[in-house]
Amino acid sequence: MARFSSLLASAACVVVPLVALVVPGLTEPTQIATITGTQGLENIAVRSSGELLVTSTTSNLIFMVFPDGGRDPVAVAELDSSFNATLGIAELTRDVFYVIGAQVNGLTMISGSAGIWKVDLRPMTLQGGAVSQPADVSLLTAIPSAQLLNGLCRLAENDTEHILISDSVAGSISRLNVETLEYETVISDETMRVTTSSIAIGIDGIRIFQNTLYFTNINQALFASVPISLVDGTATGPIEVIADLSQGDDFAITPDGQKAIVAQNGLMTLASIDLSSGSVQVIANSTLLSATSSLAFGRRCADSKSIYVSGSASMGDTTVGSVLKLEL
């Protein structure tokens, strides 16, 4: 979490899967956007049209960033003013996203403040670089029992009703049906909890590839996996710690499912984890990566082998939300 460390492809286009990370030298990031008014950016999702949506733990706004950096970012959604933070974000149907909103104070989510918001971008239009027709934004449901909601992902590729949400303090994953609003804890385990005197954030990023859920735990400095049911999200086998990984925040799984690219928040690095062997390789090291929190691969032919990184960048005596791009 950044604050806590300081169009569909055309039918003629065939996206070649990223089958390996060949890194003769460290990959250099390029800054494509900064967003004033935010100290840092938290999570990142990519629209089917290619634009990036980013959240921030210092703002109730959701911003859209243009992947080629040719236009200024624009705020496309605003949560109620009683919320001061936006966190995990995921898309269930084309241009319909679900976002965690809350009141956050430092490392603490204010008790009873968490909720899941629905952000429907389908009615939104832009004109002259500004929003001329707003997105449809609504509070889907409050989750007063939450302690620190953080990561969010869809349960299965073709599932348009269920999302999974991590709670970094409770050390658990819950399932939410966005139609019925049924909310239930489906996995809770020691590997997800806060167990040391280190930073009080346990399970953080969560991602699913096929029927395996992967997660980071910042407090325990680990990256782990668990097989799950794609019907209800419950574990169907034991949790396996794949790698020890300091400061592992959110991450992205390569399209072939062989590696995870992880933001090492505060270490100025991105790490690649081989999901079979558990070997860890630093693939980028830059001061631009000093506070990175989340990653996502591009969805267009032009950037299918590019990865976008949300975080913060130094600006004088303060920080500002930043989006970087790396070619893998």
Image (spheres, rainbow, N blue to C red):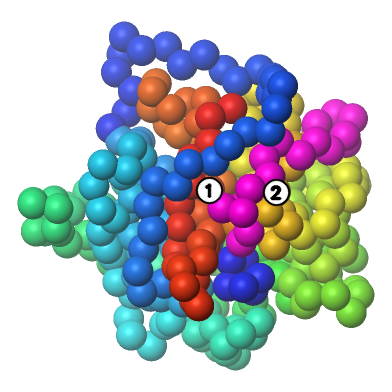
Task: Name the residue beneath numbered marker 2.
Answer: 269
**Residue type highlighted by circle 1:** Val
Category of crowding for the residue at label 1, using alpha-carbon neighbours closer than 10 angstroms: few (below 14), some (14–19), many (at least 20): many
Answer above or below: position of 237 versus 78: above
Taking the image as shown, residue 250 lies to the left or right of residue 170, namely left
**Residue at 25% from the left image edge and 58% from the top image edge:** 74
Question: Residue 165 or 245: which is nearer the viewer?
Answer: 245
Question: Residue 269 or 315: which is nearer the viewer?
Answer: 315
Spot occupied by residue 314 in the image (x, y as percentages of width and height):
51, 66
Spot occupied by residue 114 in the image (x, y as percentages of width and height):
52, 79
Q: Which residues are magenta?
A: 274-291
**Residue at 66% from the left image edge and 82% from the top image edge:** 107
Residue that sits furthest to the front in the current view: 316
Quadrant in which the C terminus appears = top right
**Residue type highlighted by circle 2:** Thr
Answer above or below: position of 222 versus 104: above
